[in-house]
Image (spheres, helix red, strand yellow):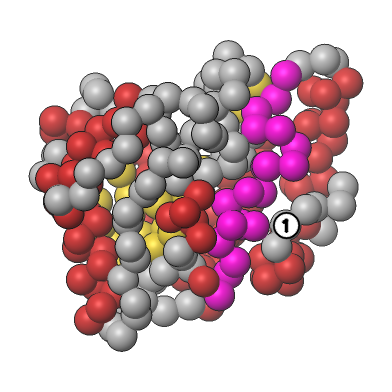
Amino acid sequence: MDVQIHPSWKNILKDEFSKDYFAELVYFLKTEKQLGRLIYPPGTLIFNAFNQTPFNKVKIVILGQDPYHGAGQAHGLSFSVPNGINPPPSLVNIFKEMEKDLGLKMPVGYGNLTSWANKGVLLLNAALTVRAGEPFSHAKMGWAIFTDAVIQKISDLKEHIVFILWGKFAQEKQILIDETKHFILKAAHPSPFSADKGFFGCRHFSKANELLAKNGIEPVDWTLLSP
């Protein structure tokens, strides 16, 4: 498979693309397609997070678990939905926290976070594809090996990155991060089932910007304007 991914990432991850597990993952995805199974996001958007945030631009990493499995929701960015799709509950809670933390008025009925990605926020899911209507259906097919390698590369090759880990699953990735040169912010997941157990009030958006500024890195403008 000719992976359609930003050249900066293609160079950093070239060894991963040549490994057996990745070949097996590609074979699995082709088989899914041959069987007529609907996969999200569309093939051109599987590596959207990497194309929107080149390696040299990464300042913050927000780690999600699985792409949205509903029609039209997934477009390759964790927690984000395309134009015309209402924000899912977790993203609604993220916006609520941002409003309290930063005083920003977040848009209603709009949840496309591409502008964050363009400003250096890598919106990375641990699995990059999912079968329609079947959450976590691709989670154990090799994607975790790949995205763990992504986190490891960022940790090894960059400095002063802010990793935002919401929920137990994301926090299990902490072991991949060198905390002597990076920053980790942890809280409960923004899901309605857990947001009131530590996500609300975490102030991760202002805290991330404070950490960047202290290290001479331009903070992220979290403003999100709907079209």
Q: On the picture, is 195 further left or further right than 149?
A: left
Magenta stretch: residue 55 in it?
yes
Magenta stretch: residue 225 in it?
no
- Judge whether 148 appears above or below 66 on screen: below
Q: Residue at x 22, y 28 (%)?
A: 194
Label 1 neighbour load within 10 Å: few <14, some 14-19, many 20+: many
Q: Which residue is mark 1?
A: 5
Q: In this orientation, which residue lies closer to the viewer: 125 or 81?
A: 81
Task: Return the x and y of residue 199 as percentages of the image width and height.
Answer: 19, 40
- Judge whether 82 appears above or below 153 on screen: above
Task: Return the x and y of residue 204 as percentages of the image width and height.
Answer: 22, 54
Q: Residue at x 14, y 33 (%)?
A: 197
Residue 181 placement: quadrant: bottom left
Task: Return the x and y of residue 200 as percentages of the image width and height.
Answer: 15, 39
Answer yes or no: is residue 37 visible.
yes
Image: magenta residue range: 38-56
Q: On the picture, is 190 further left or further right than 32?
A: left
Residue 219 placement: quadrant: bottom left
Residue at the front extreme? 227
Q: Amino acid at mark 1?
A: Ile
Q: Residue at x 76, y 16 (%)?
A: 37
